[in-house]
Amino acid sequence: AQSVAQPEDQVNVAEGNPLTVKCTYSVSGNPYLFWYVQYPNRGLQFLLKYITGDNLVKGSYGFEAEFNKSQTSFHLKKPSALVSDSALYFCAVGSGGGADGLTFGKGTHLIIQP
Amino acid sequence: KAGVTQTPRYLIKTRGQQVTLSCSPISGHRSVSWYQQTPGQGLQFLFEYFSETQRNKGNFPGRFSGRQFSNSRSEMNVSTLELGDSALYLCASRTSGREYEQYFGPGTRLTVT
């Protein structure tokens, strides 16, 4: 079975400061890792993914994530936060050809204060 | 290219009734997945369809079912609705070439009273 943990329900960051949203995972085999963002009353929007290759993955809106195999982590980062980054962020993991569907974390509310 | 569309966007049903939700994937996408989102349980995988066949199913009771048509459009049905079925139901599609990059629709908000 695969699982994802997002240990923080909420992260508060001042505008212009760097932000990190944490994610750890558990999966059999090679992990396929994703970050999605959800704005109020909207579906999920894809931000970035790690399948293979470079451990530092760059995605949409200036976000990036670092895959750390030894720590089974895939933290989301951004060097300088914007108020418009305030949203609900989900980490997800899949494995083995996609047959098992994605398993999502509980989500982290990111609040960027002006 | 048009995104994933879901209809209806909002629905109110009574306990014991049944409901059918519809999803039209992005043109060219053959895989459609369904998820249930609730405040308590978060996002949970319901099932995935590919070329009209169910490829995988999450841990939901048999009251939840789905199907996919030859044009890749998908429907999910919930029979004998319970209060706990109140949720946002999200549909996602993806191509066969980019296996995991799923594109989500806006969801259908189902309220069971």
Image: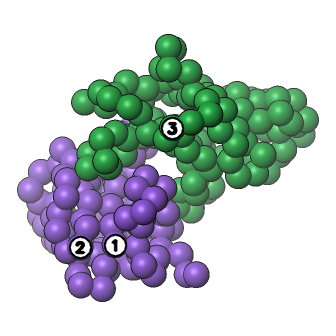
Chain colours: A green, B purple
Residue at (18% x, 44% y) in the render: B59
Amino acid type of the residue tagged 2 in the rendering: Ser
Q: Using the rendered image, report if marks 3 and 2 lie on a common chain.
A: no
Q: Marks 3 and 2, how far apart in space?
A: 27 Å
**Quarter of the image where one finds residue B109:** bottom left
Between tags 3 and 1, which lies in front?
3
Q: Residue furthest bottom?
A: B71
- The spot of residue A88 in percent (x, y) is 60, 44
Q: Residue at x 56, y 21 (%)?
A: A68
The chain that hosts pointer 3 is A
Q: Secondary structure at mark 1?
A: loop
Callout 2: chain:
B
Which residue is disc 1 drawn over? B30
Residue type for callout 1: Arg
Instruction: Indicate which disc residue B51 carries.
Output: 2
Q: Residues within 10 Å of mark 2 (few under 14, many from 20)?
A: some
Q: Is residue A2 left or right of residue A89?
A: left
Q: CA distance from mark 3 to mark 1?
A: 24 Å
Structural crowding at the residue carrying mark 1, measured as other residues with C-alpha within 10 Å and reported as few (<14), some (14–19) or many (≥20)? many
Asked whether the beta carbons under mark 3 and mark 1 sit within 8 Å of each other, the answer is no
Tell me the residue that label 3 is attached to: A52
Chain at tag 1: B
What residue appears at the point 21 percent right and 48 percent down from the top-left corner?
A: B58
Tag 3 and tag 2, C-beta contact below 8 Å: no
**Which circle's residue, 2 or 1, is located before the other in the chain?**
1
Looking at the rendered structure, which numbered label has been put on residue A75?
Answer: none
Evaluate if marks 2 and 1 touch, with contact meaning CB atoms under 8 Å apart. yes
Q: Quadrant of residue B95?
A: bottom left
Residue B30 position in % (x across, y down): 34, 72
Q: Which of B66 and B2 lies nearest the eye of the viewer? A: B2
